Image: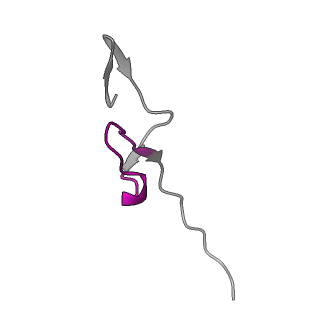
Amino acid sequence: MIGWSNGEPVRTPYDHCVLVMPSLRQLRPGVTVVRLGRIAQRTATSH
């Protein structure tokens, strides 16, 4: 759970979710933006 909205819990779409702050390009008065993400697992690659 990351917060509350009108008395209801706001949950992430999956476990181990991280919050990613947006770029300053999206910054405007009255606008709140945050992205939800997850860390991808690296896989071994052969060269």
- From the viewer's perspective, tell me whether residue 20 is left or right of residue 38: left
Q: Is residue 9 magenta?
A: no
Q: How many marks?
A: 0
What scheme was used to colour the molecule? one colour
Q: Residue at x 69, y 89 (%)?
A: 47
Main secondary structure along the magenta-highlighted residues: loop
Magenta segment range? 21-35
**Residue 18: x %, y % from top left:** 39, 47
Task: Name the residue nearer the viewer: 12 or 7.
Answer: 7
**Residue 23: x %, y % from top left:** 40, 59
Task: Name the residue nearer the viewer: 25 or 46.
Answer: 25
Farthest-out residue, right: 47
**Residue 43: x %, y % from top left:** 60, 68
Q: Residue at x 42, y 58 (%)?
A: 25
Place residue 9 in its image quadrant.
top left
- From the viewer's perspective, tell me whether residue 31 is left or right of residue 43: left
Depicted 1 relative to depicted 25: above or below: above
Depicted 3 relative to depicted 17: above or below: above
- From the viewer's perspective, tell me whether residue 7 is left or right of residue 15: left
Depicted 6 relative to depicted 37: above or below: above
**Residue 15: x %, y % from top left:** 45, 38
Farthest-out residue, top: 7
Image quadrant where one finds the N terminus: top left
Task: Name the residue nearer the viewer: 45 or 8.
Answer: 8
Depicted 29 relative to depicted 7: above or below: below
